[in-house]
Image: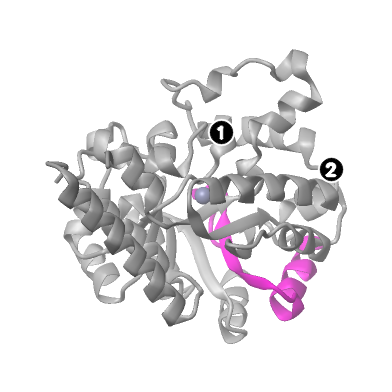
Amino acid sequence: MDLNQFIRKIPKTETHLHLEGALPWEFLEQLDPASYGNTPFFRKEKFRYVDFAQFEKILIDHALKVFRSAEDYFKVSTSIFRSALDQNIRYLETSFHAGMIEFLNIPGREILCAIHSAIPDGLEVRVFLGMSRNAYSSSLGPKLEEAVDAWDHLAGIDLHGPEELPIEEWTIPLWRKAADRGLILKAHAGEFGPASNIEFAIEKLGVKRIQHGVSACESHELMNKIAVKDVCLDMCPISNYKLRAVESWTEHPLGLFLEKGIRCTISTDDPLSFNNTLEDEYTACIEKLGLPPSKLVDVAKNGFYVADLPSNVKELFIQEIDYAWNEFSGSDSNV
Ligand SMILES: [Zn+2]
């Protein structure tokens, strides 16, 4: 068994995936072959974004060409979930962006329902509502409250968008209310912002699932706290490289975090923008970050450890990972 076969064989999780940012390129190609028939500059392997604003503009411009209705969410989700199963992803957490409720003028519940209806057998999916730090307008704010109060099938909430925006007054009460209802709490923090943003998300928002968390490496104290409190960092190495959250591959702190006993997972973030698959992320951990293959076992297991699944189901997936590892490590001098 070679490394690619091993990566394919282990059951995997994807726990940091923006649904609009996961739009498969084929949808654009089918919509307008003349404009989207070739690989655009931003999906080329060597391309790195100038900054977050450039990334965000390109993503929104492309996503809005396809997402027009709840039916579009259904079709796109069906395609995303099918290719997840092709890579042996068995548990997936995805967020859709609250701003789309206003852009498209569709009730958020309909979007959530469309995504849910697309879930195939064999894949467990949890859907989150993602909101920017400045999302709480007079029209959208009440809808965010309603989502947290009453939407069925909503797994949790996530804080999205540019990290330089301040945390507004509504945020802590909304996260607290979501916690009281038993929702899973996430926040994007420490991608471009300082370690203090991660600290805030843990201490004030009560988050145990940090999206990215790259800048935790700036503070030994914070790294210890993350390890002791068993906060999970849902990291996306290719996204971090392409968006310059790290200057070079070797600066990526995933290996350091694992060494410090911090629970980390790996995911793709926005495959529309980075042209990456989850298998690419696993491969990058070895080829770009220089981690030994045994660390792939750790990140894969971590994904199931934090998954919203019954413990006996988690156990089965973890056993499957161990079987694949034994087969791989015993087959030749792979280790
Ligand atoms: Zn993200």
- Range covered by the magenta-colored residues: 138-167
Is residue 228 placed above or below 101 in the rendered structure? below
Q: Position of residue 208 (x, y in %)?
A: 42, 71
Q: Nearer the viewer, residue 99 or 46?
A: 46
Q: Position of residue 64 (x, y in %)?
A: 76, 37
| Classed neighbour count for the residue bearing mark 2: other residues with Cα under 10 Å, few (<14), some (14–19), many (≥20) | some
Q: Is residue 293 magenta?
A: no
Q: Which is nearer the N-term, disc 1 or disc 2?
A: 2
Q: Position of residue 184 (x, y in %)?
A: 54, 73
Is residue 210 placed above or below 142 in the rendered structure? above
Residue flagged by tag 1: what amino acid is it?
A: Ser
* Mark 1 sits near ligand 1, with its Cβ under 8 Å away: no
Q: Is residue 291 visible?
A: yes
Residue pointed to by mark 1: 273
> Is disc 2 placed on a helix, strand or loop?
loop
Residue flagged by tag 2: what amino acid is it?
A: Arg
Q: Nearer the viewer, residue 275 or 215?
A: 275
| Classed neighbour count for the residue bearing mark 1: other residues with Cα under 10 Å, few (<14), some (14–19), many (≥20) | many
Residue pointed to by mark 2: 68
Q: Residue at x 42, y 73 (%)?
A: 314
Q: Position of residue 312 (x, y in %)?
A: 43, 81
| Quarter-of-image position of residue 318 | bottom left
Q: How is the image coloured?
A: one colour
